[in-house]
Amino acid sequence: MKNLNFTVMMLLVSILSFGQSPTLNSGTLAPENFQATVHFGAIPANPGLAGENVVWDFSNLAYDPEDNIATIVDPAQTSNYGTYNQANYCVHTNVGGAYNLYAYYIQGDTGIYKLAEGVSDEVSAEVSYLADSKLWLKFPFSYNDTVTDTWQENGQTYTETIVYDGYGTLITPFGTYNNVVRIKEVRPGNTTYTWFSVNPIFQIFEIASQFSLISENIPGQVLHTNEVVRDNQALVYPNPADDVINIKTEFDNAVFRLFDLHGKEIKTADVHKTLQLNTTDLVPGVYIYNISSEDKIVLNGKISIRDK
């Protein structure tokens, strides 16, 4: 009955929203103190279709379980405001409790522009757009709208096309989100897809060139939470590994999946409480894995395979 009720709910939501193209408007950005948890993830093999009332299903995407906390803050209260004092919007991300990153923006009636991202007093990751700010979103932004933007990034000039190419329902490992907008950014050699909630405007999911970013615990946005078990019900070791990976779970029937950083599934194996998986055929590097049982993810993580 529970599954039936959810199916009926999703059907009703789809019927009610069909044909209604959401628009991104000024004044609806996520407000100060708005907070969400963000995870690094693998890159899906396919970003999905463009169009109206699309369902983008990334529920099985592998991701790093480490929590990174993103908070909207007052830019004037940050240590680097002297350099970015034009900013009136700022996102602070605490990365796994290890260091802090800031992204500075100028928001106005016609759009929101990036001044810098990756700004930190602790690590060197800064990308500056101070010489010519980078358009992030134009306002209003409606389905099939296209805009071309030119900006300077660390002294080099770039041009890209930004397209609102779809809207619909987004499914991630953490939940199902309705009335979501997809923005596609294209420049030579690089295409990025980003999914936003509409009110407030907040980034839920991004597919970049080297990784994806997945948000969870987004206030007021999730329609249905996919169950992710977070206690110690599974173990993968050693890490880094050489020739074998040992897998232990509390479950009689579980599935171990190993992905490369592009989201391609490299190995899959059934686990009956314990399994020793041979890794001698793997290229040395970093991989992402998950373990599931009865359609519930019980463990996610990253593992390194050392050079033999």
Image (cartoon, rainbow, N blue to C red):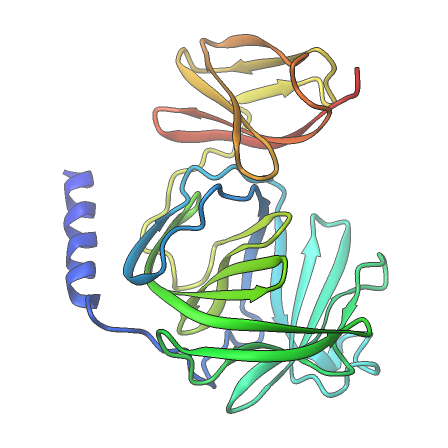
The structure residue drawn at horizontal position 44% and vertical position 73%, both measured from the top left corner, is 200
Location of residue 292 in the rendering, given as x and y in whole percent from the top left corner:
44, 26
Location of residue 190 in the rendering, given as x and y in whole percent from the top left corner:
61, 58
Which quadrant holds residue 304? Answer: top right
Which quadrant holds residue 18? Answer: bottom left
The answer to which of 304 and 73 lies nearer the viewer is: 304
The structure residue drawn at horizontal position 41% and vertical position 11%, both measured from the top left corner, is 252
Location of residue 150 in the rendering, given as x and y in whole percent from the top left corner:
65, 79
The answer to which of 172 and 93 lies nearer the viewer is: 172
Location of residue 260 with respect to 306 vertically, above or below: below
The structure residue drawn at horizontal position 56% and vertical position 41%, both measured from the top left corner, is 42
Location of residue 102 with respect to 149 vertically, above or below: above
The answer to which of 294 and 24 lies nearer the viewer is: 24
| Residue at the farthest bottom position | 109
**Which quadrant is home to the N terminus?**
top left
**Is 116 left or right of 73, judged from the image as shown?**
right
Q: Does residue 179 show up?
A: no
**Which quadrant is home to the C terminus?**
top right
